Image (spheres, rainbow, N blue to C red):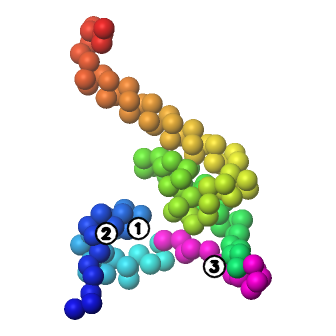
Amino acid sequence: MGKVLPELNVILKICFTLQVSVLDFLTQEAAKENSSQFPTMPQKQVVDGSRKKLEVKFDSHRTQQLLENVLQANEQPLFMTAVAKRIGYPKRVLYRHFPELCRAISAEYVKCMKESRIKRMRTVLPRGKTSC
């Protein structure tokens, strides 16, 4: 009594973000093996006790390296909101510090989505026929 099980969609989102299977997540085997693989979230510190504003320490070198890794990865490109969430900084901060890298990541995502759309259209519409 007093225990609430998380909803399946929450578990699936966590597993997607951590890139682990649901079984590994539930049995906690992957967490021990892959804990060094995932970037740690930046630490937050209170700037002033009276203002209650939180400041995030910005690790420029580490963040640039993570963005370059995302750009060079051979997997399906991610949109910048997902990249920002994965790295642990707001998208606006990433664009402010690394505008070229962020634009390149976004361009790769747009290119991939266009190619995917064209591929889907070719499978739906047989050659020589138009939609009109």
Q: Position of residue 81 (x, y in %)?
A: 53, 53
Are discs 2 and 1 less than 8 Å apart at CB? no
- Is residue 18 in the magenta section? no
Q: Nearer the viewer, mark 2 or mark 1?
A: 2
- 16 w.r.t. 50: above or below: above
* Badge 1 element: helix
Please provide the residue range marked out in magenta. Answer: 38-51
Q: Nearer the viewer, residue 80 or 62?
A: 80
Spatial separation of the CA atoms under disc 2 and disc 1: 11 Å
Classify the position of the N terminus by image quarter. bottom left
- Circle 1 residue: 18
Q: Position of residue 17 (x, y in %)?
A: 41, 64
Are discs 3 and 2 less than 8 Å apart at CB? no
- 132 w.r.t. 6: above or below: above
- Badge 3 or badge 2: first in the primary sequence: 2
- Circle 3 residue: 43
Position of 127 with respect to 17 (left or right) is: left
- Badge 2 or badge 1: first in the primary sequence: 2
Measuring 27% from the left and 87% from the top, which residue is drawn there? 3
Q: Amino acid at mark 2?
A: Ile
Are discs 1 and 3 less than 8 Å apart at CB? no
Quadrant in which residue 100 is drawn: top right
**Badge 1: residue crowd in 10 Å (few <14, some 14–19, many ≥20):** some
- Circle 2 residue: 11
> For the view shown, which residue lies furthest in the bottom direction?
1
Q: Nearer the viewer, residue 31 or 43?
A: 43
Measuring 33% from the left and 67% from the top, which residue is drawn there? 10
Q: Amino acid at mark 3?
A: Gln
- Is residue 49 in the magenta section? yes
Quadrant in which residue 104 is drawn: top right
Position of 117 with respect to 7 (left or right) is: right
Q: Is residue 21 visible?
A: no
